[in-house]
Amino acid sequence: MSELRTLTLGAGCFWCLDAVYQRTTGVTSVISGYTGGHTPNPHYREVCSGTSGHAEALQVTFDPETVPESVILGLFFTGHDPTSLNAQGYDVGTQYRSAMFYADEEEKARFEAAIAEAQELFDAPIVTTLEPLGVFHNAEAVHQDFYTENRNSGYCRVIIDPKLSHAREAFADWVS
């Protein structure tokens, strides 16, 4: 196994991409959390209020020898609408922004290239922000692997199931 890599990505509600990445070959860990804000130790209600400045985000850790970073980033752009500013469906506010949080300049350059490549798939401009990665705060336990734990809830059936289905179609070799 090669050295694992971790990316921090915000795609609206973290539950949706969590469900996708949990089922992606080569992904070793998915943690839902908050980053990009100014409030120390934010909690879900604070983040949802939009006052903490944080985005709901994921830290996805994967083995790049098993699954290429391009697949992880492709799933990111497939799993949400990167052309929607500060909103994903009914979730509205900066806490639901499309964002890529880079750890260093090399990662920032890879993210910029991924955005440019993904832009070819969308008619509207991609509004995904590139932000330096600050402190990442793990979300509360109830938000970790939410889909698996709540598969029959209305949100999972109406919102997550179609996104997971779309990811399976677009990345059939990678998503189970």
Image (tube, rainbow, N blue to C red):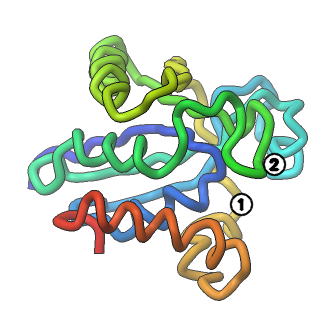
Residue visible at 66% across and 64% down?
A: 143
Residue 121 position, x and y percent, is 34, 34
Q: Which residue is mark 2?
A: 43
Q: Please state which of residues 88 and 71 is positioned toward the viewer in this rendering.
A: 88
Q: Please state which of residues 95 and 105 is positioned toward the viewer in this rendering.
A: 95
Residue 55 position, x and y percent, is 68, 36
Residue visible at 70% across and 72% down?
A: 155
Q: Residues within 10 Å of mark 1 (few under 14, many from 20)?
A: few
Residue 162 position, x and y percent, is 51, 69
In-image side of 124 versus 52 (left or right): left
In-image side of 108 versus 38 (left or right): left
The quarter of the rendered structure image containing the C terminus is bottom left
Amino acid type at image mark 2? His
From what the image shows, is residue 60 above or below residue 136?
below
Residue 48 position, x and y percent, is 83, 45
Q: Which residue is mark 1?
A: 140
